[in-house]
Amino acid sequence: MPRPGPRLRLVDVAERAGVSLATASRALAGREGVSEEVARHVRQVSRELGYVANPYARTLAGGASTTVGLIVHQIDDPYFSEIASGVLQVAAEEGLLVQIAHSGRDPENELRQLRHLIAQQVGIILIAGSGYDDPRVEAEARAELAGFQRAGGRVAVIGRHALGVDAVVPDNEAGGRDIGAHLLSLGHRRIAVAAGTPGLTTVADRLAGVTAALAAHGHSPDDLAVVHSDFTRDGGRVATERILHYHPDRTAIIALNDAMAIGVLSVLRSRRIPVPERVSVVGFDDVSVAADLAPSLTTVRLPMTEMGRMALTLALKPKATRPRRRSTGHTLIVRDSTGPAPAPGR
Amino acid sequence: MPRPGPRLRLVDVAERAGVSLATASRALAGREGVSEEVARHVRQVSRELGYVANPYARTLAGGASTTVGLIVHQIDDPYFSEIASGVLQVAAEEGLLVQIAHSGRDPENELRQLRHLIAQQVGIILIAGSGYDDPRVEAEARAELAGFQRAGGRVAVIGRHALGVDAVVPDNEAGGRDIGAHLLSLGHRRIAVAAGTPGLTTVADRLAGVTAALAAHGHSPDDLAVVHSDFTRDGGRVATERILHYHPDRTAIIALNDAMAIGVLSVLRSRRIPVPERVSVVGFDDVSVAADLAPSLTTVRLPMTEMGRMALTLALKPKATRPRRRSTGHTLIVRDSTGPAPAPGR
DNA sequence: CACGCTTACGAAAGCGCTTACGTAAGCGCT
DNA sequence: AGCGCTTACGTAAGCGCTTTCGTAAGCGTG
């Protein structure tokens, strides 16, 4: 059992291996300038001794930081915790540390967290979650990230674009179209949308998809009753109350994420409005509980965990000249919350 | 706009404030040996310049590390993500960094993560999640933590005991008793338990509470049908299948956490077994979706976010001579998934 | 008013690592 | 043999911070 005595340093390893500090460092970093034979020996000794480099010293000395900073809106939102899970998986494989910071869906705060991570000298920054429809904030974020990259940092974003960096983007618009098409094929014509805050690009994109689907089938976007609220479960509740009040004729409600859909279902249940007989409900994301709700939720599946993995993997590659973009697949998962539109005559 | 040029260093702040490096360091650290007047001035300048200390340099130089390592079983489990959220809140208030690592409910892996965090020189370690009923692993973990604390590290655990460190512990046994009493009062006598892996102390404690409640009412623990499986939603599914098969006479199923309860409900729904008319279901934890399931879940509420906050707060205080223990409150939340036991004669 | 004592501050020594830079050895070439 | 080139390694200079130690100033005391 390794006694937790005075910490093992690189000099100790070097000494034990009979080489200089510099050589030991090079050998372990896999840098060239060391014969393969010596390098192997050093690695061997290091392993025997159970040496783990001090990341603080390493980073301070100018080595690449092995810390990745992950900014999420809210870690206890399943969408983000699944993404985080994917990031953690890859990080564990690569021996990286992951720091998580909350932005709380507040652009200003996100910017603050971002600056903080940069100041902390993390090596990689990952930002998950929708962007904001606020040119000033986005421009500042973009500038901040550009500077960070110029200084050798790597960045990837998940589910947002327009930041001039590598991105993993679900095709929100196509997902929205799939939902629209699905409801139309079931005969729904009077559709409502429980949308999140208008300032979020994710909301805008998904909504655009829905509208496009309607248009493609010759329906005017004016037919759509769009109600904005928070992009959360409570937001879903509020939106539903409003939809039921102002648009009582709707036969389907599209929630632009699953969190909102849960709120929608909750209100409908308490009002004893049968789903899907009287109103169909669709979500977006397919968080893991979606299948366990009653009725189980029809939604668009996004591979969140995989998105987290992809983002870190992308950031680990050397920077390309142009920002890369990886699209994720998406699948409409039809479950029990959607059904044929009720007959028009009631 | 702060140009992302060459990083601002403490010397820069010191120079700008017209004091020496040492004084600036002391002023910002709030250490004594600086007149209040000078200290205030330095802080002022630091703020104006937007200075953020380099944590790597700070830690390397022997200052207390400002990083807290958080080990969770699985971040995309709501129980843990809510705890993590609480930890992140306090960390943000205190200007600390949070590193999250997965243990994956594997004792060996948890030990590995723990050693890694220690080697990384984090200042505070938080371990969330049930302990293991494996004396060897627990002893090693305990030894590792003791060494870490001897070296000045601080530790707190959440939801587990017997590690000889400060702990935030929900009263799992009392919660179990509440559940047992609730079901008995509804007339249930033939009760089944969908329990998690037997090796987890949380499982053992909650189960003990249930058994105690039965005993207190003069029922033998043998009356309880206990089925062990994974402490997850899928485990809940598996356990339910087995309960329905081997103990078809049960009128209530206690899932020892909400994740399992979701699995239980899912199977009952697909079998068209009415809840709570034919079978009542109870969970434990009150994760946020519990209220939105159909039927909404009767469960024992644990203040997870608060637990995360408490743990970090505890770890931030200087070490006490004896490990401290903070109990969290717990409340039985009765919702729609429990009801009177069906009449005996079918 | 010399004495010690405290207090506020500066100079400088590292923390453990990476990485120029220097050097000696080995190689092929003229 | 002598030249320059490459390769393998060691020496030492920091990275930005904390902290020990030294010193000068301020204070009350006999």
Image: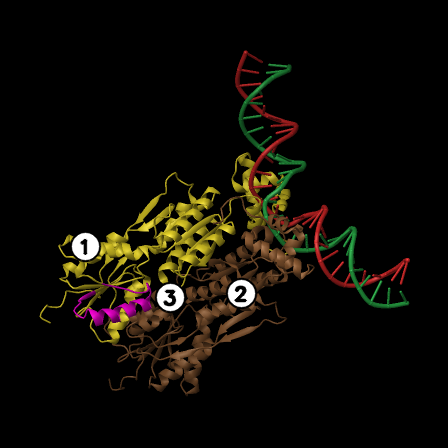
Chain colours: A brown, B yellow, C green, D red
Depicted A190 relative to depicted B231: above or below:
below
Residue drawn at (39%, 71%), measured in percent from left and top?
A257
- As drawn, is A219 to the left or to the right of B181? right
- As drawn, is B344 to the left or to the right of B15? left
Looking at the rendered structure, the kind of residue marked 3 is Thr
Q: Chain of mark 2?
A: A
Q: Are marks 2 and 3 in contact (CB under 8 Å)?
A: no
Quarter containing the C terminus of chain B: bottom left
Depicted B108 relative to depicted D21: above or below:
below
**Circle 2 Cα neighbour tier, 10 Å, few/some/many (<14 / 14–19 / ≥20):** some
A294 inside magenta stretch: no
Q: Nearer the viewer, mark 1 or mark 3?
A: 1
Looking at the rendered structure, the kind of residue marked 2 is Glu
Secondary structure type for disc 2: helix
Secondary structure type for disc 3: loop
Residue drawn at (58%, 41%), measured in percent from left and top?
B24
Q: Residue A89, how many percent across, how many down?
A: 47, 64
Q: Could you say which disc has been placed on residue A138 in the image?
A: 2
